[in-house]
Image: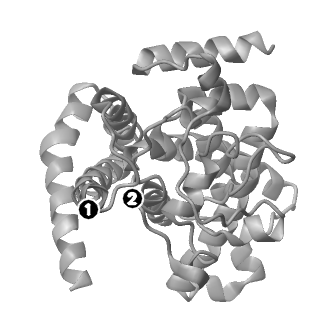
């Protein structure tokens, strides 16, 4: 079954690239970029399929068991535009390939001086022979990094001025996952891409890691009254666990500037004392919104206000 799906996708990928992308590259005299464009086309198709399935499945879940009745359809449309831009715009993959030549140059320079940087597969040879365990291992490492990056987004005032946009949604849905300032995206995606390159993640595997993370993140932001039970809440970030992170007065304020920072695995919050397993589905947003602070309703308003917040702290 899996092989059949892979073959079907490969055929679709090849067809779209050869009939739609390659002619454009040649017309623009960019034939030398064909290899990267081939990977970008794959990422685009995966994103398109992913968005379609999420809209069907998570959309149905939100209709079946919503946390709240949502009336601002314009807010949701704006969030959907972020999802389209991020998941069809190749941002993580683009950064990955832009950074790869720099990493390769550094690696080559070190090797010319007989300095061979070790990779994870040098330390753990079995990673190269066990694809599934390799995938899980890299996923855990990247998720650990994501936890700390997320905490810094809340701890560093200048970074929070950008990340606040993500928390300003008062009617959270599965579209909210990608509601981020573009500068915030560049910082986070660059950090993930650099780490992935440094630990030896292959491009194809990087795509799979990004997609797996995004699916869970979309679910965790969904307007759905779901949790994973007494044990499951400790194994994977649930909509209830993450909603507490977005809660007014809880999601950012406090001794550690919030709680429940984990992206995939709640164990990081447990280990570092930031877990809150409160059994509620609280209202979302930022406390200063209740005092009249505006974060914008449209894409460009939100981006401009984010820049203003950033430079007002400079």
Image: 313 above or below 25: above
The image position of residue 291, as x and y in percent, is 64, 19
Which residue is label 2 attached to? 224
Task: Examine the image and state in which quarter residue 157 appears.
Answer: top right
Question: Which quadrant does the N terminus fall into?
Answer: bottom left
Residue 38 shown left or right of residue 300 in the figure: left
Give the residue pinned by disc 1: 64
Q: Considering only order in the chain, which callout, 1 or 2, is on the residue closer to the N terminus?
A: 1
Residues 223 and 202: in front is 223
Distance from disc 2 to disc 1, alpha carbons, whole Å, reads 8 Å
Tell me the tag on residue 50.
Answer: none
How many labels were placed on the picture?
2
Q: Nearer the viewer, residue 53 or 252?
A: 252
Asked whether residue 215 is in view, the answer is yes
Judged left or right of residue 7, residue 246 is: right
Badge 2 vs badge 1, beta-carbon distance below 8 Å: yes
Label 2 sits on a secondary structure element that is: loop
- 103 is higher (above) or lower (below) than 25: below
Q: Residue at x 55, y 50 (%)?
A: 282
Q: Is residue 275 left or right of residue 286?
A: right
| Percent x, y of residue 85 | 37, 34
């Amino acid at each position: 079954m899996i092989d059949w799906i892979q073959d079907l996708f490969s055929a679709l990928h090849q067809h779209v690239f050869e009939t739609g992308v390659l002619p454009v590259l040649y017309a623009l005299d960019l034939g030398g970029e064909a290899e990267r464009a081939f990977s970008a086309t794959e990422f685009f198709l995966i994103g398109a399929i992913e968005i379609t399935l999420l809209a069907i499945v998570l959309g149905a879940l939100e209709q079946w068991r919503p946390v709240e009745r949502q009336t601002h359809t314009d807010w949701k449309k704006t969030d959907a535009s972020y999802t389209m831009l991020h998941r069809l715009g190749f941002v993580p993959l683009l950064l990955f390939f832009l950074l790869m030549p720099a990493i390769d140059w550094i690696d080559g320079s070190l090797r010319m001086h007989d300095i061979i940087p070790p990779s994870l597969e040098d330390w753990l040879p079995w990673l190269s022979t066990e694809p599934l365990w390799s995938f899980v291992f890299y996923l855990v490492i990247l998720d650990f990094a994501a936890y700390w990056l997320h905490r810094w987004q809340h701890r560093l005032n200048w970074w929070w001025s950008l990340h606040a946009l993500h928390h300003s949604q008062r009617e959270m849905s599965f579209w909210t996952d990608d509601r981020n300032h573009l500068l915030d995206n560049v910082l986070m995606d660059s950090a993930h891409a650099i780490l992935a390159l440094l630990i030896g993640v292959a491009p194809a595997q990087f795509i799979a890691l990004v997609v797996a993370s995004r699916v869970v993140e979309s679910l965790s932001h969904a307007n759905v009254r779901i949790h994973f039970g007494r044990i499951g809440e400790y194994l994977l970030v649930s909509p209830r666990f993450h909603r507490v992170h977005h809660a007014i007065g809880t999601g950012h304020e406090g001794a550690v500037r919030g709680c429940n920072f984990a992206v995939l695995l709640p164990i990081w919050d447990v280990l570092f004392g930031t877990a809150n397993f409160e059994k509620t589905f609280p209202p979302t947003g930022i406390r200063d919104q209740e005092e009249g602070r505006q974060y914008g309703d449209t894409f460009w308003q939100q981006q401009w206000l984010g820049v203003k917040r950033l430079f007002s702290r400079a």
